[in-house]
Amino acid sequence: MEAIDNMAAQIAKDYQNKVPVFVGVLNGAFMFVSDFLKAYPHPCEVSFVRLSSYQGLTSTGIVESLLDIPEDVEGKSVIILEDVIDTGRTLKQLVHLFSNTNVEEFKIASLFYKSDGYNGEYSIDYVGMEIPNRFIVGYGLDYNELGRNLKEVYQLNDSNMINLVLFGKPGAGKGTQAGFLKEKYNLKHISTGDVFRYNMKNGTELGKLAKSYIDRGDLVPDEVTINMLKAEVEKNPDAAGFIFDGFPRTAAQAEALDNFLESKNMKVDATIALEADENILVNRLLERGKESGRSDDQDETKIRNRFDEYNEKTAPLRSYYENQEKFHIVNGIGEVTEITERLAKVIDSLG
Ligand code: AMP
């Protein structure tokens, strides 16, 4: 491929008196690395890293590597070989991974580059080809792990899927509104709270694990919640879209959701926060608690604790989604039908 020959020639020119270490990013870059190295004329070392978007999530939301950075990179010039750079999340992980090494130089080379989707956090030193912000498959790149063996690169058809996140403090009406929106837009509604309660009722391992947190009004740990959410999405491969109700609630969950959806050629289209005053919500929840029997709805201290969890851990997601231009606010006070109309207005305005 001409783009690879050009990249190899350019890097060869810049590194003619050095022996760079090329570090391929698995799995996607394996074909690119192979062809690149065949086109690279000077001495060089070769190694690989592998990042996991889905496993070993740390509290910071930074994902761990499955295959560690190569030994003996100290004092050397490292050039990362990536197959594609789109949002920049993987790149951030790579920079983080190498930040504790004493490499002499750290450069990034990517065969494909989606400038429209890139957050621009780090400069990219060598680019093979700029491409539109579309999902591509083949030549090492996968769609749900398939298609890596295709010799050429293909663009997947865009789907008309809509994926929405509903934010709002407990009692803001997320569940009620999701019930209407899922009918109107033919979406699958996933309420993490409902899934936990279903598991608690049926005495599953997950239910037992979540119970103590839910009873106190604390959040269930990220890893448990994230795995559960993924399993719920996986159960609905034919869904025309999802309403995520009560997820994400932490920064780590938001990042995990983006990574997970991206791996399935999906994305969050919009997040909508239903706003309502806490004192109104306390009364709503206490009323609801009388009928539903939910213990976390019957005690004002637990309710206030859930608000605190929201304010501390979930409210900061506003800026996360504002940065992606996906955050909308809807007034959650009024008639139920009126609020549905406000939400529909936002959804219908999505491009
Ligand atoms: P909800 O029905 O959405 O009010 O959720 C009830 C409870 O389930 C919450 O107070 C949490 O203990 C737990 N829960 C629901 N969703 C999540 C989440 N995304 N992360 C952590 N805990 C959650």
Image: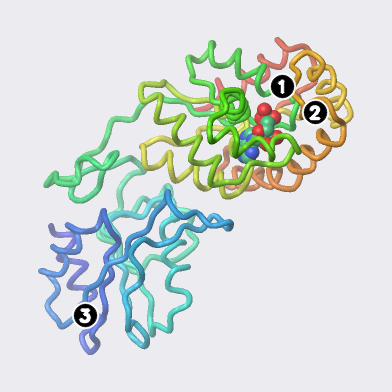
Instruction: Find ligand 1 in the image and state its quadrant.
Output: top right
Q: Which amino acid is tagged 2?
A: Ala
The answer to whether residue 186 is above or below residue 4 is: above
Amino acid at pointer 3: Lys
Q: Is residue 286 left or right of residue 218?
A: right
Amino acid of disc 1 = Gly
Secondary structure beneath label 3: helix
**Residue shown at 16%/66% (left/top)?**
36
Residue 273 appears in the picture as rendered:
no
Of badges 3 and 1, nearer the viewer stands 1
What's the residue at 48%, 40% (across, down)? 227
**Residue situated in front as seen by the camera: 186 or 4:** 186
Quarter-wise, where is residue 155 in the image? top left
- Residue 212: percent from left, percent from top: 69, 39
Q: Is residue 97 left or right of residue 336?
A: left
Q: Name the one closer to the observer, 73 or 68.
A: 68
Quadrant hosting residue 32: bottom left
Q: Are the two marked residues, 3 and 1, in contact with CB atoms closer than 8 angstroms?
A: no
Mark 3 vs mark 2, CA separation in Å: 61 Å
What residue is pinned by disc 1? 173
Left or right: where 201 falls relative to 276: left
Colour scheme shown: rainbow
| Residue contact at pointers 1 and 2, CB within 8 angstroms | yes
Identify the image quadrant of the N terminus: bottom left
Q: Crowding near pointer 2: few (<14 within 10 Å), some, many (20+)?
A: some
Upstream in the sequence, badge 3 or badge 1?
3
Residue marked by disc 3: 13
- Residue at the spot of label 2: 276
Q: Which residue is rendered at x = 33% and y = 64% of the image?
A: 67
In the depicted structure, whether residue 296 falls above or below residue 99? above
Camera-side mark, 3 or 2: 2
